[in-house]
Amino acid sequence: MINELQEILSEFGIEKINTFNMSLDEQNRIIEYLKHLDPKEKKAFLIAKNHLGTSFNIVKSTGYNEWKKNSNNAISM
């Protein structure tokens, strides 16, 4: 799982992510989130990452958290 996550993150220019305290469930959600992005969303994601630099944290990003909230709501319906 970590290899797949690192591979997808590298496509977005994210060299490293600390997965030490991250559950496999959270890793899977990040993979799903990144795979679902359309070209416009990918561009916005990359702009945000570039502007924030090393302070960028995908788990704390607005886009990821909104997607996670919406996907949780869809599952519970």
Image: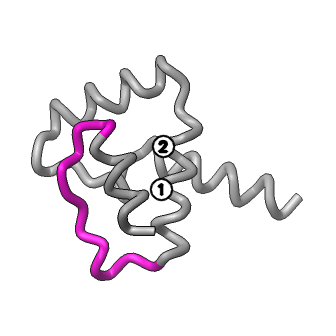
Residue 39 lies in the magenta-colored region: no
Q: Main secondary structure of the magenta part?
A: loop
**Which residue ends up furthest to the top in the rendered image?**
40
Q: Is residue 36 above or below residue 72?
A: above
Left or right relative to 42: residue 12: left
User: Residue 20 — which label?
Assistant: none
Q: Give the residue number, with chain letter if any, for mark 1.
A: 30
Element on which disc 2 rests: helix
Left or right relative to 8: residue 36: right
Provide the residue span drawn in magenta. Answer: 11-23
Q: Position of residue 4 (x, y in %)?
A: 42, 58
Looking at numbered disc 1 in the image, what kind of residue is underneath it?
A: Ile
Element on which disc 1 rests: helix
Q: Residue at x 79, y 53 (%)?
A: 74
Q: Position of residue 47 (x, y in %)?
A: 26, 25
User: Residue 34 — which label?
Assistant: 2
Left or right relative to 55: residue 29: right
Does the residue at mark 1 contact the one at mark 2 (Cβ under 8 Å)? yes
The total of numbered circles placed on residues is: 2
Give the camera-side residue of 51 and 32: 32
Task: Report how far apart the C-alphas of labels 1 and 2 lie in the structure.
Answer: 6 Å
Q: Residue at x 48, y 43 (%)?
A: 34
